[in-house]
């Protein structure tokens, strides 16, 4: 997966006491796949409750990143400050 790193520069991170909301990057694939491969998560996110394959997750991740490029907004990676692990996503899409 190739995404020019220049498109990711200049994006603002948001922080709370416990969380960081930041842009997704291609490096998030493994952690996002871990989340999207869970049926109990996917029943709330789409695909009729079916977990995603790694290839489907990669496609979704690229779509999330490209959405930011096209529209200037999108879904954030939600990261725990405590252990710096990706724990989900939040945001807007059209």
Image: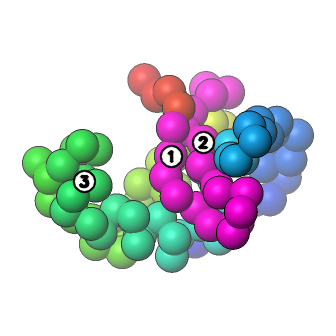
Residue occupied by mark 2: 76
Residue at horizontal 70 percent and vertical 47 percent from the top:
18
Residue at horizontal 74 percent and vertical 37 percent from the top:
16
Which is more toward the observer, 87 or 92?
87
**Per the image, is 82 magenta?**
yes
Which is more toward the observer, 45 or 26?
45
SS at mark 3?
Answer: helix
Residue 70: quadrant of the picture: top right
Q: Mark 2 vs mark 1: which is more N-terminal?
A: 2
**Per the image, is 32 magenta?**
no
Position above or below: 51 against 11:
below
> Magenta segment range?
70-90
Question: Cα distance, mark 2 to mark 1?
Answer: 5 Å
Q: Is residue 75 left or right of residue 94?
A: right
Question: Cα distance, mark 3 to mark 2?
Answer: 17 Å
At which x and y percent is residue 55?
35, 72
Residue 23 visible in image: no
Residue occupied by mark 1: 89
Q: Quadrant of the C terminus?
A: top left
Residue 5: quadrant of the picture: bottom right
Q: Is residue 70 left or right of residue 45?
A: right
Q: Quadrant of the N terminus?
A: bottom right
Residue occupied by mark 3: 42
Question: Cα distance, mark 1 to mark 3?
Answer: 12 Å
Q: Mark 3 vs mark 2: which is more N-terminal?
A: 3
SS at mark 2?
Answer: strand
């Amino acid at each position: 997966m190739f995404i020019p790193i220049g498109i990711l520069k200049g994006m603002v991170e948001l922080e709370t006491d416990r969380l960081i909301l930041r842009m997704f990057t291609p490096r998030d694939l493994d952690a996002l796949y871990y989340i999207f491969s869970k049926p109990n998560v996917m029943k709330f996110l789409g695909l009729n409750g079916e977990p995603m394959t790694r290839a489907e997750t990669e496609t979704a991740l690229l779509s999330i990143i490209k959405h930011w490029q096209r529209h200037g907004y999108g879904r954030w990676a939600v990261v725990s400050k405590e252990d710096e692990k990706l724990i989900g996503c939040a945001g807007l899409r059209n």
